Image (cartoon, rainbow, N blue to C red):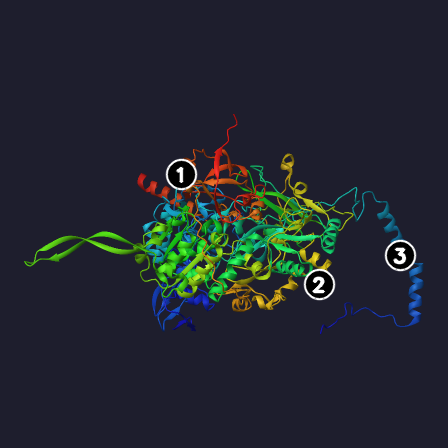
Amino acid sequence: MKKYYYVDKERKLILSPYEKFIKSVKRCLNTELFSGIFLIAKEVFKPNNSATIKYPMEKMKLDNRYRAVHRLQRFIESENERCIGCGLCEKICISNCIRMETKLGDDGRKLVSNYSINLGRCIYCGFCAEVCPELAIVHGVEYENAAEQRSYFAHKKDILTPIDNLINQVEFEGAGSLRADADDFVKATPNYYEISISTNNEEVKNA
Amino acid sequence: MKININGKECLANDGDYVLQVARANDIFIPAICYLNDCSPTLACRMCMVEIDGKRSYACNTKVKDGMQVLSNTKELWDERNAIMQTYCINHPLQCGVCDKSGECELQNFTHKAQVDTQNHWIKEIDRRHQDWGALQYDPSLCIVCERCITVCKDKIGDSELKTIARGGDAPDKDFKDTMSKDAYAVWTKFQKSLIAPQNGTTLDCQECAECVSVCPTGAIINKNFQYRSNAWELTRIPASNPHSSDCELMYYDVKQKSIKDNTKMVYRVSNDFHFTTLNKAARFAYDIASDCKGKDEVEFNRLVSLFKDNKIKNVKFNSYITNEEAYILELLRQKYGFNLVNNEALCFQDFLKTFCAHSGSFYNASSDDVKKSDFIVIAGSFLRHDNPTLSYKVNNAIVMNKGAGLYFHPIKDTKFSKIAKNFVSVNCDYGKEAQVLEFILQYFAKDLPQDLAYIKDAFYEEQIEVEVKSKDAEGNEIKEKKQETIKKSSLAKELGFDEDKLKDLLLKKANFTLIIGNDYFYHENAKYLAYLLANIQKLTDFKVMLIPPRTNTLGVSLLCKLSKASDGFTLGYNERGDFSFSNDEHNNLASSNLLEQEGTFVNYDKRLVPTNAALKFKGYYLNDLANALGLDALYTIEYTEQLPKDKGFLNIAFDDLTNHYDNAGNNHRGYLIDTCEFVKNLKQDNQIPQNIKSTCECKKDDIVILANPIGNLSKYTNKSSFFNECASLYASKDYLAKHNLKENSMVKIYDDKDEIIIKVVLDKNIENGAYLPTFDDKINPYKFFKTRRYYALNIKEISYE
């Protein structure tokens, strides 16, 4: 069982009604009351002083880790879509709100012809972003997605980074993204070994 | 005998492989390259086990009494880990997009063997994606387990795949010391070979796609499934092949059509490749569902009133229906007294009845017997075209049992005749159906009945020169030439076949099967042929198998009382009639397709097998019609339990039917029809039929037979986007030459009454003949082929000048 303890043991308890009466009379006659009113009045009339933000005129700056409406990313270099259509997000989604269509593209690669997320059903858990091997599906910072209906869908065209806006694409830093020191964990591939062997051999020969 | 695997006592038969025994007893031994009913290739070496302390491979070690087998020791798994590591060298990390991901054996065994590092490397070589038409081959994904080659050779019979040199470097010698011997051997072999079609670049096979099914990785895949769906998104619905009478177990893999359209669609058909082999029709003809929008009440009520007013005189239907539907039709017939018209099933039914009456039993072979037999005779069937699945079983038997066989057909199927040296194609003339059976009786039967005594005397004498060696008085050899008279079968001569050859073929053979196809059922002399066949079953060692021409011909002939059409109003059920209640394009009322309904078929093994609905059907089922006419069943499958006992059916409810194979390969599909019961309740007609001697007097070169190209078996298969062809006349090269025709030219084929204008197409795999297909319902070949399956037709090229 949890044991309770007093926070302020030393505090004196007012026992008699007379003492109580004396104390309240003292308080009423004190300027203590006005100091409080004055403080509030000062805060009220202070310019640019507000504990809340003036939504919707003003919006909060969100961290890149924030899990709001999803985005489909592109590669900065090639401008290609990052999504390879592996379907892991579709599989892992615990509220079963992701669905995708894939087919054979003209270039012989897997093409994601459409992609949809039921935002009314999504619980924004971030599993899709976490499981994505290509960092293609990530959470964005767009959280204003109220709608008239319970189910409403974001399709690929809605969430894919437009090519002309590629410059503003932001990396997601939340779960599933690469850590800052990811490079240190890369293991050399067999091909790499081979290259290093041949260069070593050449060095030996040259020497 | 008994063997001990991992401490478990297992019963085994002589000649079994250890792996088979383990699987039959639910003991897991990893194996990639081994396929049931095929010869072990020993490519993957994963099935290594310790037998009495010695290392061997479970897939090709035969059991011995008292064997102690260990398959799970740490050393073995270390070796397996090394082998799986070699398979992963340079294997592309494209599981994300690979179609096999999720059902990939390379993935599974890599995990199972706990491969977590890669200690080896080798130079990558150019392994570009290859386009093989309907199939696609990606060499970089291939682990050269050779299962595709094995299945193609041992089961399908096309032998279309082979290994070619890969041109890769041999693994570095240094690795030899650090890795296990088996892993190094697997790697070395892996670096040497790749899979390729026989002619090197493109496939020239029947495209059954069984190689796709057996491929453990995504190396060979169907083009029409490529990148369409992940395996785990698909729902597997067990069913039976609705296109041919093998009714093999298969699965419809179903998923929503698209993001916007939530209705279900079949994405592919898969199978348990260890136990079943699907033909091209089952594999690809799945997108055939009708686009019925809903219930057309007006037409339905019209149909009901047609029945109620007793206007319907004939109900024409085909055998692509379930037993339940056939039974409903029969019940309606009993109620309304119309004729049930199904010419093809009627022929089969008559043949079967005559056969049963004279042999006193049902035909006694099943496809399992075919698989076990070592001497197979096929007559009256253009087998690879009529029933591809049975041709796989024949090939499997002949290859695996070192069997022999005779294949009587006027048209030479060049690929089928090449399956084994001891499988002899006899290209007898048309109209020799009776002679084939008579010859079998003459050669194999011991005591012939009185009325067949003439077969015994069908011999002629031939003079041959024989060299006789002898020694004269002084001991020198003298060679003398003597004239000798020998008796030879005149029947064999008529068939154009040397009976002496048969002796070699029959060496050490014990299990005989005779397979009889359509030609015999449609023959005008069918009754007599059935009588001969009954005698073969009674008097010889042959087991006899009839191939029901269509999916449920056998079920329909058991259940329905069929008759010829009479004049009057005809309702076409799935056929064209005065009122068509059909799944064809031009119908009055849409009916459901076989993949849209539950029910059962009776397959050629005399087994009742269940099938499930893959897709939803929005229109009226036949059952709805039956309900409107006074029968009472909520679902069609309520009739499964009611199928008549006196026809051999057991009263088992649909939901109690199982549909699977167990690990030992035992068939747990539905139940076997009680054929004794059927024969017992048959009205016996023991009158011995007369042999109508009719000779085929037409010009042999002009004859065209009624057959479909391999796989495109019916109008239903042709509905699918995979086939969807226009009918052509498929002709051999010599047929084209004889009639001075060019390939792909338009021709007119005609007799004195009718004509059809059609394109003529070369079929490279046949010799001396041509065939006209039935899959296209825009042409009606039956106006020529009224009884027999072959007919002499004049042919003329049309010129547009």
Measure the alpha-carbon separation of dots 2 and 3: 91 Å
Most foreground residue, A144 or B744? B744
What amino acid is labelled 2 in the image? Asp
Name the quadrant containing residue A200. Answer: top left
Image depth: mark 1 or mark 3 in front: 1
Residue indicated by mark 1 = B734
Name the spot of residue B68 as percent of width and height, x first: 37, 71
What amino acid is labelled 1 in the image? Asp
What amino acid is labelled 3 in the image? Glu
Q: Chain of mark 1?
A: B
Could you tell me which secondary element the residue under label 2 belongs to?
Answer: loop
Question: Would you place residue B398 above or below residue B160 in this image?
Answer: below
- Neighbour class for label 2 at 10 Å: few (<14), some, many (≥20)? some
Q: Residue at x 91, y 68 (%)?
A: A20
Q: Are marks 1 and 2 in contact (CB under 8 Å)?
A: no
Residue indicated by mark 2 = B632
Most foreground residue, B374 or B230? B374
Name the quadrant containing residue B81. Answer: bottom left
Q: Is residue A61 visible?
A: yes
Most foreground residue, B665 or B321? B321
**Are tags 1 and 2 found on a single chain?**
yes
Q: Residue at x 75, y 52 (%)?
A: B301
What residue occupies the far left of the structure in this picture? B474
Q: Residue at x 79, y 41 (%)?
A: A57
Q: Point out the tag, 1 or 2, that comes first from the N-terminus.
A: 2
Name the spot of residue A123 as percent of width and height, x first: 69, 54
Q: In the image, B708: left or right of B587? A: left
Measure the alpha-carbon separation of dots 1 and 2: 58 Å
Q: Is residue B395 visible?
A: no
Residue indicated by mark 3 = A32
Could you tell me which secondary element the residue under label 3 belongs to?
Answer: helix
